[in-house]
Image (cartoon, rainbow, N blue to C red):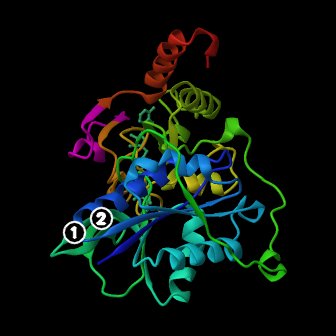
Amino acid sequence: METILFLTHTETDGSLSKAAREALAAAITLSRELPGASLSAGVVAADDAQAAADSIVGCGATRFLVVTGDDFATARYATDAAAAEALVQAAGATLVVAAGTSRWARCLAGVAQRLHGRVDTHATAVAVEAGAPAVTRWYYRQRIEGVSQRAQRPWFILMEPGSAEPWQGAPAPAALERVPVALDERLRRTAFSGWRAPRTDQQTIRPEADLLFVAGAGWTKKQADGQTHLADAERLILGFLHLAQASLGGSKSLVDLSGEGQAVLPFMTHLNQVGQTGSTPRHPKGLATCCHGEEPHVVGWRFINERRAINLDPNCGWASGKADVLYVADAFAVVEQLNRLLASKRPSEAP
Ligand SMILES: Cc1cc2nc3c(=O)[nH]c(=O)nc-3n(C[C@H](O)[C@H](O)[C@H](O)COP(=O)(O)OP(=O)(O)OC[C@H]3O[C@@H](n4cnc5c(N)ncnc54)[C@H](O)[C@@H]3O)c2cc1C
């Protein structure tokens, strides 16, 4: 019989993220479908973890184990690993389900090793097959979907954020069990010194956005008048992102240009690249602009449900069934008009 631990850390405000509640939904699925399984929650928090535990009290967990203290305010391999190890042992967990956040991704493979377990990352679904847990994930740049089962325990499963509906339930007081973690100065050698992040108006990657806006190299190419229009491209793209709160993706050709330090769309980096050698983001909708839609790019759209593209070329890659709608049009003109329409809905926010 499996003992399932939903393992989570809190956010800076003490709450649980959407990704954490998605992982909780997966843990609940396993606990309901595995015969005789039990579910516990393990929370790592800087505060007393009460609010976080209260928010998931209706999930069916029988125990709410918490590791708390200032040492857990920010991500740090040594202390996060110690906290996770203590919680897994306190729960006697055979299955550990956690969100694939950067914080957990960094340390849970090490914890699995310490506990002589196994770990699977980037899981997109869990199920029960032949009475045993099964984990689905994608391989070979999202081209092959595989389902695996393992005999080794504890088995750590990191759920890919954006793969499931987040669990929701009414909060109520939870009875907490505090789990002690022995920390010494050796584990505190790495100290958090501060954040270094782009200005928020330059933050173009928004995983929670409803829309992925992809910019291709066409934005930097000579247009009908024989000239490039980089300043217009920058104004239109940033204006659209701001007004639509969309996330920005790019084709390889475009981000490579930026990487060479040329005066082209300086806000594009390789982090924006979508595709075979880039990312595979998950957004309900996507709009490709000035992007040809070649296979190595479109393979990164695997999880975009509704796809539209704007291209001057009626024979571009999107036309061959890769987009639901292809607008054969000048993206400069279309996005200009789109921004005007969006701004008219929010008059104080003209691009
Ligand atoms: C091993 C390998 C891995 C790769 N991995 C990736 C990857 O991860 N991601 C990726 O993106 N690519 C990848 N590529 C490259 C990929 O094959 C393409 O070369 C690249 O995606 C092309 O980028 P693009 O469509 O922006 O540029 P282009 O092919 O130059 O297309 C520009 C498009 O803009 C259109 N256009 C121009 N002006 C306008 C306008 N005013 N309005 C509307 N449309 C306009 C043109 O019609 C054209 O279709 C990979 C290639 C290889 C070999």
Position of residue 86 relative to residue 43, above or below, is: below
Q: Position of residue 139 (x, y in %)?
A: 33, 72
Secondary-structure class at tag 1: strand
Give the quarter of the image for residue 36.
bottom left
Kind of residue at disc 1: Val
Please name whichever residue, 228 or 178, is drawn nearer the observer in this view of the structure: 178
Position of residue 117 relative to residue 237, above or below, is: below
Q: Is residue 310 magenta?
A: yes
Please name whichever residue, 274 or 81, is drawn nearer the observer in this view of the structure: 81
Q: Residue at x 36, y 88 (%)?
A: 152
Mark positioned earlier in the residue sequence (2 or 1): 2
Position of residue 167 relative to residue 23, above or below, is: above
Q: Residue at x 26, y 46 (%)?
A: 322
Q: Farthest residue to the left: give it.
A: 130
Please tell me how crowded label 1 is: few (under 14), some (14-19), or many (20+) other residues with Cα within 10 Å: some
Q: Is the residue marked 2 within 8 Å of ligand 1, measured from its CB?
A: no
**Boundaries of the magenta span:** 309-326
Q: Farthest residue to the front: give it.
A: 175
Q: Position of residue 295 (x, y in %)?
A: 32, 57
Q: Are marks 2 and 1 in contact (CB under 8 Å)?
A: yes
Q: Position of residue 10 (x, y in %)?
A: 61, 54
Please name whichever residue, 199 or 337, is drawn nearer the observer in this view of the structure: 199
Q: How many marks?
A: 2
Please name whichever residue, 78 or 278, is drawn nearer the observer in this view of the structure: 78
Which mark, residue 128?
Answer: 1
What is the spatial separation of the Cα atoms under label 2 and label 1, in whole angstroms? 7 Å
Position of residue 84 relative to residue 248, above or below, is: below
Q: Residue at x 48, y 74 (%)?
A: 91
